[in-house]
Image (cartoon, helix red, strand yellow):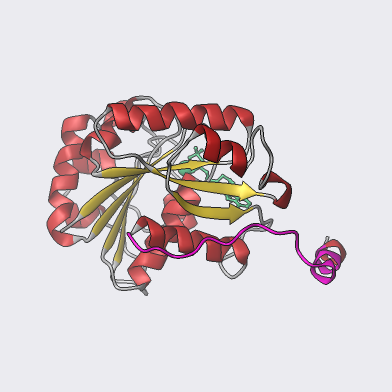
Amino acid sequence: MCEVIAIVSGKGGVGKSTLARAAGLALSRSGKKVCLIDLDMGLRSLDILLGLQDRVVFDLADLGEGMCRLKQALVRPRDNENLALISAAQLRGGEAIGQVQLSRVVKGLKPHFDMVLIDCPAGIGRGFLNALHVSDRAVLVSVPGAVELRDAERVRGLVRHLGLADPGLVLNRVRPGDMEDEHFGLKAYREKLEGIRLLGLVPEEIPLGEEGAAGQALETAAFNLAGEERPIQEIRRPRLWKRLALAIRG
Ligand SMILES: Nc1ncnc2c1ncn2[C@@H]1O[C@H](COP(=O)(O)OP(=O)(O)OP(=O)(O)O)[C@@H](O)[C@H]1O
Ligand SMILES: [Mg+2]
């Protein structure tokens, strides 16, 4: 059976698309058939993050309006038959895909995929509401910060209010000092979002790569999102030699 999961956040730029990409790649490589929907109309990013930007001909708005067939809007990496992307429109806004059209698209995808991941626009506007309407559950992405935490509380509340199960949480861009911070760190998140299931704890890593600790943590989050119970690593300060190497590399 196909599961539809919305990736949501209150604040923008917290790592929703980064998680969508990582989860799409990790879960499809493990054998699941995964479709990513970029719902960030006018500000799409998954096409570039997956290196598929030159292959997008039809987008979500075209599909919603019946301008193309489902197959024509699905873009697949050449080396991965299990993964597909439906891109957001780049030159049109959120009004280009309504709830009815999105429902129709998702319904059409269900027989072909094990999982549909919807990369939502930030915030609690139309895209967020439409995505939740068609989703079975949601995952909330946030980064340590007082405002981010308050927004995460609000989004969690809305997800539950709309009748979905409590969303899982992925806390991204975490630095070692954030672990115990009472105002905006993991401790604060655990207190204010009491009972929320932590799916992943992703360290801040610049540049962000697939091989490093952040890449591994995103993979853990992806498998936990898919129902596994993988242990979550704490974020520790790198050892002295690694700090030196990083400092030398600049
Ligand atoms: N763990 C991390 N360490 C360092 N940089 C990160 C990390 N996670 C994400 N980033 C960077 O943060 C930026 C924003 O990430 P991303 O686009 O995934 O956020 P988003 O929530 O999808 O944003 P938007 O709300 O605009 O759609 C990107 O440049 C990304 O590479
Ligand atoms: Mg995004």
Q: Is residue 59 above or below residue 146?
A: below
Q: What residue is at 37 percent from the left and 24 percent from the top?
A: 125
Residue 65 shows up from this direction: no
Q: From the top left corner, tell me how far across and down residue 139 is, in percent.
A: 39, 45
Res 123 quadrant in image? top left
- The answer to whether residue 24 is magenta is no
Q: What residue is at 33 percent from the left and 59 percent from the top?
A: 226
Q: Is residue 11 above or below residue 204?
A: above
Res 105 quadrant in image? top left
- The answer to whether residue 231 is magenta is yes
Residue 122 shows up from this direction: yes
* 44 or 153, nearer to the observer: 153
Could you tell me what secondary structure mostly forms the magenta stretch?
Answer: loop
Q: What residue is at 35 percent from the left and 42 percent from the top?
A: 88
Question: Magenta region: which residues?
Answer: 227-246
Q: Quadrant of the N terminus?
A: bottom left
Q: Is residue 27 above or below residue 57?
A: below
* 239 or 29, nearer to the observer: 239
Q: How many marks?
A: 0
Q: From the top left corner, tell me how far across and down residue 60 is, in percent.
A: 27, 43
* 71 or 205, nearer to the observer: 205
Q: From the top left corner, tell me how far across and down residue 116 is, in percent.
A: 27, 53
Q: Is residue 140 above or below residue 240?
A: above
- Residue 51 located left or right of residue 102: right
Q: Quadrant of the C terminus?
A: bottom right
Q: What residue is at 62 percent from the left and 67 percent from the top?
A: 212
- Residue 142 located left or right of residue 8: right
